[in-house]
Image (tube, rainbow, N blue to C red):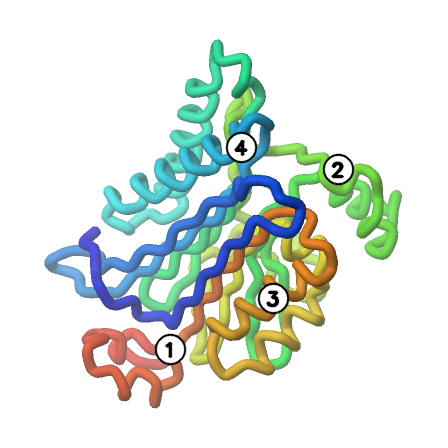
Amino acid sequence: MIHSTNAHLNIAVLSHPGMTGKNNEDRYAVSSYTVSKDDAKPVVFAVVADGIGGHRAGEVAAELAVNYISQGVFESNAYKPIKILQEAIEDASQAIAAHSAGKAEQEGMGSTCACAWVIGNQLYTAHVGDSRIYLIRGDKIKRITKDHTWVQEAMDKGIITTEQAHDHPNVHVIRRYLGSIALPKVDFRMWLLDEPETDDEANSNQGFKLETADIILLCSDGLTDLVWEDEILKIIRSKKELKSAANVLVNTANERGGHDNITVILMEVPKLEDTQKNKKKSGFLNWLPGKK
């Protein structure tokens, strides 16, 4: 792909270490491209990684995750997004495992990842761990990823309720992460419906077509541990600018204790009038939902 200086989505990003004095072990990247010299289709790729491990090992793992995944996507032709994402995430996991081998202070380090790849107006996602991706459309918010945690498994099996999950002692026990000895299974399920979906149905949602004013939120668990989904929706929809929404989301988590690092990426499909105000974003009008 070819780097582009103008993203075809409105974007706001904010990362904060939280209120406990710990290092910020979250890492993120957002990049804009066109597919190739012969294909001017606009592309945006975003990734959030939340590091695991003491002695600053977590931030090393998260940095490796973001760098390897972003590089793998950049070097691709964007024609097979799922295969490209899988290979990039697996490469990142192997790099983290190799980096920690034989280093006592980094033994067992790892990272989550949540990736959103918008090619034209189509959304592709991948994730490992408990960093999340949400889709906001109109007055609804939908978590389109499912956490790889003990608590999520217990809820799926009916062992605990959603309310019990918030304060459960195992809330941060992660079942899947980058840097593990065995390659983690990359999750491509995109949960879009309110009624139950099978794994196959959720996987088939990849390439989901975004509409004008849709917002994609990527975030680490420092946000979702303290700010509930209905509150996230209310905050985002109450602000005219994504930057303001990102600030309020992070500030709200910090006001409630800010016990972990907090990272928020917001990406919005612009309204037609927004794109007309900025003619420099050449090519995007051809990729608006409903346009050929």
The answer to which quarter of the image holds residue 152 is: top right
Q: Of tags 3 and 2, which is closer to the observer?
A: 3
Screen quadrant of the C terminus? bottom left
Res 150 label: 2
Say which amino acid is labelled 4. Answer: Gly
User: Residue drawn at (58%, 80%), measured in percent from left and top?
Assistant: 237
Q: Seen in the image, is 260 located left or right of residue 29?
A: right
Whichever of labels 2 and 1 marks the residue nearer the N terminus, that label is: 2
Q: Of tags 2 and 1, which is closer to the observer?
A: 2
| Position of residue 286 measured from the top left corner of the image (x, y, whole percent) | 25, 77
Spatial CA span between label 2 and label 1: 38 Å
From the image, tell me which residue sits under label 1.
Answer: 289
User: Residue drawn at (54%, 53%), measured in percent from left and top?
Assistant: 16
| Image: 42 above or below 83 | below
Q: Residues within 10 Å of mark 4 (few under 14, many from 20)?
A: many
Whichever of labels 2 and 4 marks the residue nearer the N terminus, that label is: 4
Res 57 label: none
Say which amino acid is labelled 2. Answer: Trp
Whichever of labels 1 and 3 marks the residue nearer the N terminus, that label is: 3
Res 249 label: 3
The answer to which quarter of the image holds residue 277 is: bottom left
Which of 176/287 is in front?
176
- Where disc 1 sits, the SS reads loop
Say which amino acid is labelled 1. Answer: Pro
Which of 287/29 is in front?
29
From the image, tell me which residue sits under label 4.
Answer: 58
Whichever of labels 3 and 2 marks the residue nearer the N terminus, that label is: 2
User: Residue drawn at (46%, 31%), measured in percent from left and top?
Assistant: 60
Q: Which residue is situated farthest in the top direction here?
A: 102
